[in-house]
Amino acid sequence: MKNNIPGFLPLAFILYVLTMFAHAQDTPAGQYYQNSWNNTNTHSGYLLTTGQYTLYLHPEGENAFVFPCVKPAKLISPYGPRGGRMHTGVDLKQNLGDSIVAAWDGCVRMAKESYYGYGKLVVIRHENGLETLYAHLSKVCVKENTYVKAGDLIGLAGRTGRATTEHLHFETRFLYEPFNPTIIINVETRMLISDTLHINNKKFKAGSMPATDTITMSKQNLCDLFEDFSVDTITPTADSSTSLPPQPAPPAKKTYHIVVKGDSLYKISKRYGISISKLCKINNMKETDILSLGRKIKLE
């Protein structure tokens, strides 16, 4: 049978892949993963070697951490050996349909309706090289190769796959290797324990970044290359604000905010403690409006 696929499609795909690699290598994640991007497996090769790595976790501001469970979450199974096998994450009790959100900004590497014992699964790669995994979902709300922001809805809690109760199985990984999430995240306070993750000869340890150190992070989003291919615009759920860590008080006499890369009405409203509806009213805009870089957003 003659192939009726237009000849330009393979070329377009090749150009797309080349573009992906060109952009990805500008981020620490692209360098760590040798520009590889795999939508098939949670573990693709053995990249973690003996040596030292330091990953900045961005506890505040852009790329701020958001606890993945919007509703209260009780730790029901810790990381470690369990039933003769390794439990490579933590289980957080949730009710069916509870909102699950992205822990950091990043790009969805995997979004599967069924993946072995994980059931419905989402894996997000973050710019600093971390990956987070969200499993046993009842519904996947994002698509692969889509850029998401911290706090964006990515799925609903469930018990798909090998699970005995509704919960979120949450993993943190670096170079495909899982490590205990509670090294860097306090489940009870729902906040980061430190601003830095140190990996020394395959051992993971939380720490602090010395003030004299300089952090070189590319401003290029990991998935800027996907912006023309993204099929979904993710809107945070109304109750996702309960998962946000406390924000600093607004600067004194601050009457406007200048839009920078990564800003959204949602982020600005949380930073200054002003509702999105009020921001829209005093700026004569709609919630769906796109914020242009350098725009002044009135705060009062």
Image (spheres, grey):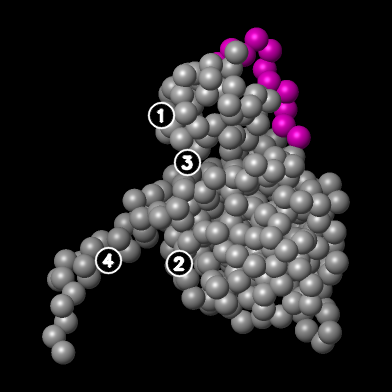
Check whether the beta carbons of the residues at disc 3 and disc 4 lie within 8 A of each other. no
Mark 3 or mark 1: which comes first in sequence? Answer: 3
Q: Residue furthest bottom?
A: 1
Q: Find the distance from the CA under tag 3 to the CA under tag 4.
A: 26 Å
* Residue matched to label 3: 219
Q: Horizontal and vertical percent for residue 20?
A: 36, 58
Is residue 241 covered in magenta? no
Instruction: Name the amino acid type tagged 1.
Output: Ser
Mark 1 or mark 2: which comes first in sequence? Answer: 2
Mark 1, residues whose alpha carbon is within 10 Å: few (<14), some, or many (≥20)?
Answer: few
Q: Nearer the viewer, residue 259 or 176?
A: 259
* Picture layout, residue 267 above or below residue 197: above
Check whether the beta carbons of the residues at disc 1 and disc 4 lie within 8 A of each other. no
To which quarter of the image does residue 22 belong?
bottom left
* Residue matched to label 1: 292
Left or right: 170, with 227 as reference point = right
Question: What secondary structure is marked by label 3?
Answer: loop
Q: Horizontal and vertical percent for residue 62?
A: 58, 38
Residues in magenta, as a range = 246-256
> Main SS type for the magenta part?
loop
* Residue matched to label 4: 13
Q: Nearer the viewer, residue 224 or 134?
A: 134
* Picture layout, residue 181 above or below residue 246: below
In which quadrant is the N terminus drawn? Answer: bottom left
Q: Residue at x 23, y 63 (%)?
A: 12
* Picture layout, residue 153 above or below residue 213: below
* Residue matched to label 2: 37
Q: Nearer the viewer, residue 6 or 85?
A: 6
Instruction: Name the amino acid type tagged 4.
Output: Phe
